[in-house]
Image: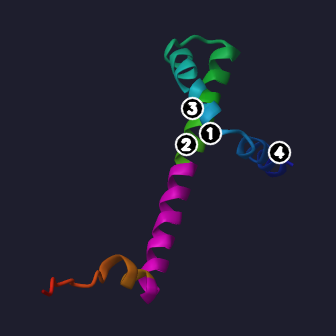
Amino acid sequence: MLEKTLENIAERILALDEASLTGLWKKYKLKMEEFNTTKEWEKAVIVFFIINAVRVKNHIFNEQVAKNQEKHSDKNPDNKKKSKDIPYLKRIK
């Protein structure tokens, strides 16, 4: 039950736009830094770390995609030829 609930929360969070979340980052950081013993403060801490989790997840995802694309382009001889083997041109009179 608990695991399913957490997976449902994660699914909903993944549907959120990172740019919109990033816009809220500062607001929740400030709320978190102003410690008090209320439920609102506790929620602010959770929201702040959710926003950070999405940002970190996207950063890791983008790094891995870039690595895979780099590996793929290194294995493809046509890509190497196009980008690295520029023919030497000589002026002839």
Figure quadrant of the C terminus: bottom left
Contact, mark 3 vs mark 1 (Cβ under 8 Å)? yes
- Give, as a three-letter code, the residue at label 3: Thr
Report crowding for label 3: few under 14, some 14 to 19, many 20 or more residues within 10 A (C-alpha): some
Residue of label 4? 5
75 sits to left or right of 24: left
Region in magenta: 57-78
Report crowding for label 2: few under 14, some 14 to 19, many 20 or more residues within 10 A (C-alpha): some
Residue of label 1? 18
Question: Is residue 23 on the magenta stretch?
Answer: no
Dominant secondary-structure state across the stretch colored magenta: helix
- Give, as a three-letter code, the residue at label 4: Thr
As measured in the structure, the alpha-carbon distance from the residue carrying label 1 to the one carrying label 2 is 7 Å
Q: Earlier in the sequence, mark 3 or mark 2?
A: 3
Please tell me which residue lies in front, 87 or 28. 87
Q: Earlier in the sequence, mark 4 or mark 1?
A: 4
**Vertical order, 53 against 35 (above or below):** below
**Vertical order, 43 against 51 (above or below):** above
Disc assigned to residue 55: 2
Disc assigned to residue 22: 3
Question: Is residue 62 on the magenta stretch?
Answer: yes
- Give, as a three-letter code, the residue at label 1: Glu
- Give, as a three-letter code, the residue at label 2: Arg
Please tell me which residue lies in front, 93 or 72. 93
